[in-house]
Amino acid sequence: MVLRGSLTVEYSRVNRNRANLTSSLPSFAGDGVIELSANSGAIHVGDGVPTRVDSSELADNVVTANDPRGEVLAVDSAMRVGDSPLVMRTVSSGATG
């Protein structure tokens, strides 16, 4: 995770990364909700970090979440960017199907 400075990804392949969450926690603990999530299998950028992705491929990244007793969330398999400026040019998903 990039929390400060800046991030530049150029002429790169960011492929086949995974983030997995497995839990058996319930949805609630007392009166409070237990919030569980998995995100950004590949790139995770925090707030205030200028980010540029150029001439690159982001493909086959996966996020999974499993909790038979609770509620989980799985999002942003390739890239999650917080409240930061983002520029993307010539970026492909590499998807074939």
Image (cartoon, rainbow, N blue to C red):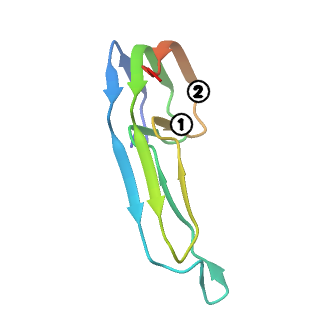
In the rendered view, would you say 63 is above or below 10?
Answer: below
The total of numbered circles placed on residues is: 2
Left or right of residue 83, residue 1 in this image? left
Q: Give the class, few, some or many, for how many residues have Cα within 10 Å of label 2's Cα (few <14, many ≥20).
A: few
Left or right of residue 40, residue 71 in this image? right
Furthest residue in direction front, as rendered = 97
User: Could you say which disc has been placed on residue 81 in the image?
Assistant: 1
Q: Give the class, few, some or many, for how many residues have Cα within 10 Å of label 1's Cα (few <14, many ≥20).
A: many
- Give the structural element (helix, strand or loop) at label 2: loop
At 45% from the left edge and 35% from the top edge, which residue is drawn?
Answer: 78
* Whole-percent x, y for residue 17 in the image: 33, 39
Q: Could you tell me which quadrant the N terminus lies in?
A: top left
Left or right of residue 80, residue 60 in this image? left
At 59% from the left edge and 77% from the top edge, which residue is drawn?
Answer: 27
At 43% from the left edge and 28% from the top edge, which residue is drawn?
Answer: 6
At 57% from the left edge and 75% from the top edge, which residue is drawn?
Answer: 34
The residue singled out by tag 2 in the image is 85
- The amino acid at mark 1 is Val
